[in-house]
Image (cartoon, rainbow, N blue to C red):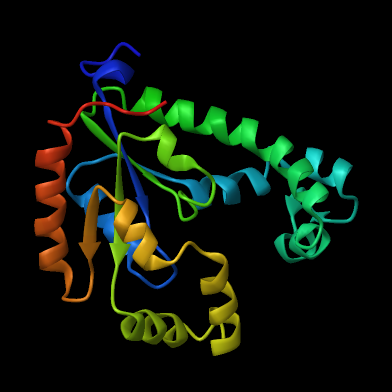
């Protein structure tokens, strides 16, 4: 990196939070504050719609259509098969790594960047960032937000929550906690505080 800050001086924030906590809104507010944000989910979607599709079709025939991965079919194929999940990860993770490296190169002039990774703790991603921001809200507001989307019922929500690291544990392991229970302005204030503090912290990524 040849930017003013570059990899050596850049601080990398890992942004995470359970479903319905307000993580996506918080990521947008970091962007609003001028911080480059890498959206891991969006990167996977992009790979599934192009670069990764041929290799996934070769490994799991019948899981793509028109050059794009059929996510429900792929999920059904691998979800109960740990060996298949590992095989899928071997295909996707190197491509994701290249995508992240391009993001870092493009953001070389930024003093702080954000990696928006829903399963940060579940995948050991906290070792690859300098500080972790956990987004939280009350369990009641979490359920209200998710069910209001109309895309899942209570049983499906319970199953998703059961698979994620509990919110209380995430908050314990966080360097910063952003509470989205009280509207956008308090979140903006919390983000301003985080950005002022993180540049003073030592780098700790592996």
Number of callouts in the render?
0
**Does residue 116 appear anywhere in the picture?**
yes
Residue 177 position within the rendered picture, expressed as x and y whole percent measured from the top left: 23, 58
Looking at this view, name the residue that lies furthest to the top. 2
Q: Nearer the viewer, residue 177 or 69?
A: 177
* On screen, residue 171 above or below 32: below
Lateral position of residue 201 relative to residue 21, left or right: left
Lateral position of residue 43 relative to residue 13, left or right: right
* On screen, residue 65 above or below 7: below
Residue 41 position within the rendered picture, expressed as x and y whole percent measured from the top left: 52, 52
Residue 171 position within the rendered picture, expressed as x and y whole percent measured from the top left: 31, 59
User: Residue visible at 51% across and 51% down?
Assistant: 42
User: Residue visible at 34% across and 86% down?
Assistant: 140
Residue 166 appears in which quarter of the rendering?
bottom left
**Does residue 49 appear anywhere in the picture?**
no
Q: Nearer the viewer, residue 98 or 154?
A: 154
Image quarter where the C terminus lies is top left
Image quarter where the N terminus lies is top left
* On screen, residue 50 above or below 182: above
User: Residue visible at 55% across and 72% down?
Assistant: 162
Lateral position of residue 142 relative to residue 120, left or right: left
* On screen, residue 150 above or below 89: below
Looking at this view, name the residue that lies furthest to the right. 61
User: Residue visible at 41% across and 41% down?
Assistant: 126
Residue 58 position within the rendered picture, expressed as x and y whole percent measured from the top left: 88, 41
Q: Nearer the viewer, residue 105 or 120?
A: 120
Q: Nearer the viewer, residue 190 or 206?
A: 206
């Amino acid at each position: 990196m040849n930017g003013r800050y570059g990899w050596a001086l850049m601080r990398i924030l890992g942004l995470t939070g359970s479903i319905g906590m307000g993580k996506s809104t918080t990521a947008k507010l970091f962007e609003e504050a001028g911080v480059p944000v890498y959206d891991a989910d969006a990167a996977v979607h992009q790979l599934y719609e192009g670069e990764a599709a041929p290799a996934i079709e070769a490994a799991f025939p019948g899981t793509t259509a028109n050059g794009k991965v059929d996510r429900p079919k792929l999920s059904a194929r691998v979800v109960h098969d740990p060996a298949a999940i590992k095989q899928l990860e071997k295909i996707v993770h190197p491509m994701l790594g290249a995508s992240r490296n391009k993001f870092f190169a493009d953001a070389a002039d930024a003093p702080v960047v954000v990696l928006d990774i829903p399963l940060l703790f579940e995948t050991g991603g906290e070792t690859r960032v300098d500080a972790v921001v956990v987004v939280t809200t009350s369990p009641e507001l979490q359920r209200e937000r998710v069910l209001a989307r109309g895309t899942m019922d209570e049983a499906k929500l319970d199953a998703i929550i059961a698979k994620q690291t509990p919110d209380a544990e995430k908050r314990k392991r966080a360097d910063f906690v952003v509470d989205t229970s009280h509207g956008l302005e308090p979140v903006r204030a919390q983000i301003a505080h985080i950005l002022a503090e993180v540049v003073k912290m030592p780098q700790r990524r592996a």
